[in-house]
Amino acid sequence: MQVGHDQQKSTICKSRLWFGLDKQLSTLVLKFNFIFFNQQRLSADGILIPNLHKALFVACNSMTDTLIIEKATEEIQSQSFGFTQQFLEIHQIEYSDNKPKVSRVDTEKEDGTAIVYFPVVDQKFYVAVYLDTYPEISVRHVNTESFHSVYFIARSEVLSFNDLSALTTLKPTGGWDKGDKKRFGDSVHKFSCLNFEPNLEADEFDDKIEKLLAFLEKDKEGIKALVDKANGYIQVTTSFHNGNTMLGGHHLDKNIIKRLGSLNLEIDFDIYADGNYFKEP
């Protein structure tokens, strides 16, 4: 009799079976997330997901985000890409609990690409790790992503903050009244101010201007009133990494320009070159 041998063989078979199921489940999670990652497209197409599928959707997103962060963190620690090595020679990533701190995981791209943003010590810009999420999670490349603050602002020496707020149905992100004390120093504001900045996360400029315009377009007449009565406009503040003095720039396509025009909006850019130069090879 070969009972011992058969039991051992049976255990091996079961082990292989469970290993195979784990691989299949992992693949299923990634495939499910790739298919359903864009919730806005699901809503636009009128597809209704049953409660069980919604729960699975949330679980898949959470699990996939964890795997994406792990893979991106692995690159920061192993520095397998030349850019990662080059950048970490001159700057440091912020850490929390002995791990690289993550500012944001962006999985909103329609092609399934993910971006993990890591904050840089004493700087506003980020290290961005770009990953493919299908058929498996893998790092595509690494670069810096500039800090972008993109917001609408309206100011008045006559109207109060409440007066400005009453011109629109949109909820302000912040603001102040004429005569209020400034956050720093002993001086006071000489005008009232209201601003809208719906996207405060680490993100690309194209996404930020798109999200701001989509927000403002919810009350076109209100925004036009703020433009007419309080000189409202869009302000962009950007901090580029000045590693090789090639800063790049912002691009406004004709659709964005058309949408700006429909709201009578001007746009102003404040651009800063920050950080250390790359070391000479």
Image (cartoon, rainbow, N blue to C red):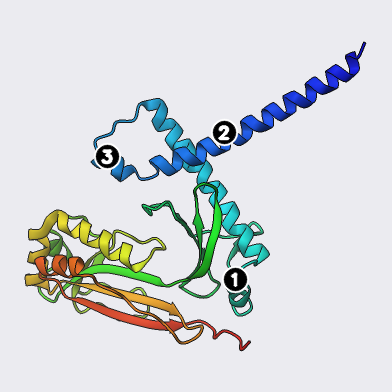
- Return the x and y of residue 138 as percentages of the image width and height: 56, 55
Residue that carries the numbered disc 1 in the rendered image: 84
Instruction: Report the amino acid beneath label 1.
Output: Thr
Q: Dot 3: what SS?
A: helix
Q: Is residue 169 visible?
A: no
Residue at x 12%, y 63% (from the top left corner): 223
Nearer to me, 152 or 3: 3
Q: Compared with residue 249, is residue 220 higher up or lower down, i.e. above or below?
A: above
Most extreme residue toward the front, as rendered? Answer: 1
Q: Compared with residue 150, is residue 185 higher up or lower down, i.e. above or below?
A: below
Q: Compared with residue 168, is residue 144 higher up or lower down, i.e. above or below?
A: below
Q: Name the quadrant of the C terminus.
A: bottom right
Instruction: Report the amino acid beneath label 2.
Output: Leu
Q: Is residue 158 visible?
A: yes
Q: Any mark on residue 43, and which?
A: 3
N-term mark: 2 or 3: 2
- Return the x and y of residue 269 as percentages of the image width and height: 28, 79
Q: CA distance from mark 3 to mark 1?
A: 38 Å
Residue that carries the numbered disc 2 in the rendered image: 25
Q: CA distance from mark 2 to mark 1?
A: 32 Å
